[in-house]
């Protein structure tokens, strides 16, 4: 009986100890959550994600393809309802070029007449302008800009309408109108990323790097409107857990949706890389962001140098040694091909 009492007392004490263990800081107390901290990648680089123009905003907002859009996108009130824009990084205008035999015009309103056909890219500000102001004309909207130019060259439309810097590469501008600003677009709620991009754009402009990038792609003086407001960030934000900015800094990738068939803003080079004004701006912007958050070097933009060397060749096309002209021509062409391969940045132009 004595042993049974002792066992009962020990069980009772054990139960009491277990009951009070939580209150006394015993094993049942949960471990505190570790405090979150940013684990940044060594650098940040732009990663280009091709998108058609019409679905580019839905692709951004779906959250899978990219964190931002840079694609010569005009900041409009309609788009601002579904995305947030950075400060302007380019100020543009709309323009018109004509096809073969197109009548001269002195103002865009001259196009607003029956029998006039206008080609433009669907979903662009040109499309919106034409719908609101050129109801009498026949508007043909195409999926991409190359299709617009093909339609103009084929005679399917009389005029092409679009961003003036882009059209000027295809023909002489007949008129320009409707000044507008381009901005990067981010998802609504991506305030930290928007702020970082705003500060980076401001730094690119203030340093003079913007002027160098602009001069590499466009003629004339820089015309960039300052559309900043009291709400535009002037200091880099502190990244928080789960934000788009944190995703960029931890992965080292800023994924950018773009429609890469729109030179001089974005297009593919011969090696399949995205090039153009927007590409150079994206490089400068991510360099600014990486320099702030990672402490990396922030090199200034250097315009590529493309020199052309002309070599004159005296080819014996006539006379007693004319028989040697064909093999001489082949040998010269092979030599020039070798020179081009050895120095890709130097063009060699063979002349006779």
Image (spheres, grey):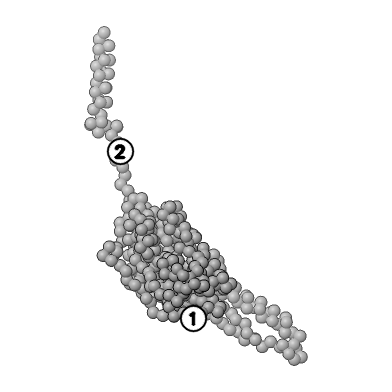
* Nearer to me, 26 or 169: 169
* Nearer to me, 6 or 51: 51
Vertical relation: 55 (above or below) 15: below
Give the percent coordinates (x, y) of residue 311: 60, 84
24 left or right of 181 in image: left
Residue 12: name its quadrant.
Answer: top left
What element does badge 1 sit on? loop
Give the percent coordinates (x, y) of residue 305: 49, 77
Q: Quadrant of the C terminus?
A: bottom right
Q: Nearer the viewer, mark 1 or mark 2?
A: 1
- At 44% from the left and 80% from the top, the residue drawn is 106
Give the percent coordinates (x, y) of residue 162: 46, 71
* Nearer to me, 104 or 23: 104
What element does badge 2 sit on? loop
Q: Quadrant of the N terminus?
A: top left
User: 10 Å neighbourhood of mark 1: few (<14), some, or many (≥20)?
Assistant: few
Asked whether residue 72 appears in the rendered view, the answer is no
Residue 26: name its quadrant.
Answer: top left
Vertical relation: 348 (above or below) 51: below
Q: Which tag, 1 or 2, sits closer to the chain's start?
A: 2
Q: Marks 1/2: CA distance?
A: 78 Å
The tally of labels here is 2
- At 38% from the left and 61% from the top, the residue drawn is 79
Give the percent coordinates (x, y) of residue 244: 37, 54
Disc 1 target residue: 104
279 left or right of 229 in image: right
Asked whether residue 231 appears in the rendered view, the answer is yes
Disc 2 target residue: 31
- At 62% from the left and 86% from the top, the residue drawn is 312
231 left or right of 346 in image: left
């Amino acid at each position: 009986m004595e042993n049974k009492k002792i066992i009962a007392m020990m069980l009772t004490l054990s139960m009491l100890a277990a009951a009070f263990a939580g209150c006394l800081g015993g094993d049942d107390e949960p471990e505190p959550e570790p405090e979150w901290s940013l684990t940044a990648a060594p650098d940040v680089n732009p990663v280009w994600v091709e998108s058609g123009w019409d679905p580019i905003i839905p692709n951004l907002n779906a959250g899978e393809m990219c964190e931002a859009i840079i694609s010569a996108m005009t900041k409009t009130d309609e788009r601002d309802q579904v995305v947030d824009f950075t400060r302007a990084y380019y100020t543009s205008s709309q323009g018109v070029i004509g096809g073969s035999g197109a009548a001269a015009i002195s103002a865009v309103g001259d196009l607003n007449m029956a029998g006039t056909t206008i080609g433009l890219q669907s979903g662009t500000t040109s499309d919106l302008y034409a719908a609101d102001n050129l109801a009498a004309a026949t508007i043909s909207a195409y999926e991409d800009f190359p299709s617009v130019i093909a339609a103009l060259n084929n005679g399917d439309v009389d005029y092409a309408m679009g961003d003036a810097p882009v059209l000027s590469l295809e023909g002489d501008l007949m008129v320009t109108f409707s000044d507008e600003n381009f901005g990067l677009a981010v998802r609504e709620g991506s305030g930290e990323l928007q702020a970082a991009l705003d500060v980076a754009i401001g730094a690119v402009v203030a340093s003079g790097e913007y002027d160098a990038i602009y001069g590499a792609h466009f003629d004339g003086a820089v015309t960039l409107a300052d559309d900043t407001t009291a709400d535009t960030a002037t200091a880099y934000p502190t990244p928080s857990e789960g934000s788009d900015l944190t995703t960029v800094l931890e992965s080292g990738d800023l994924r950018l949706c773009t429609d890469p068939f729109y030179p001089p803003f974005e297009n593919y080079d011969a090696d399949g890389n995205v090039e153009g004004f927007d590409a150079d701006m994206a490089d400068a912007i991510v360099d600014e962001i990486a320099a702030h958050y990672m402490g990396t070097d922030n090199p200034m933009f250097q315009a590529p140098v493309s020199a052309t060397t002309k070599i004159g060749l005296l080819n014996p096309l006539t006379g007693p040694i004319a028989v040697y002209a064909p093999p001489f021509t082949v040998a010269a062409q092979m030599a020039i091909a070798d020179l081009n391969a050895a120095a890709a940045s130097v063009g060699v132009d063979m002349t006779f």
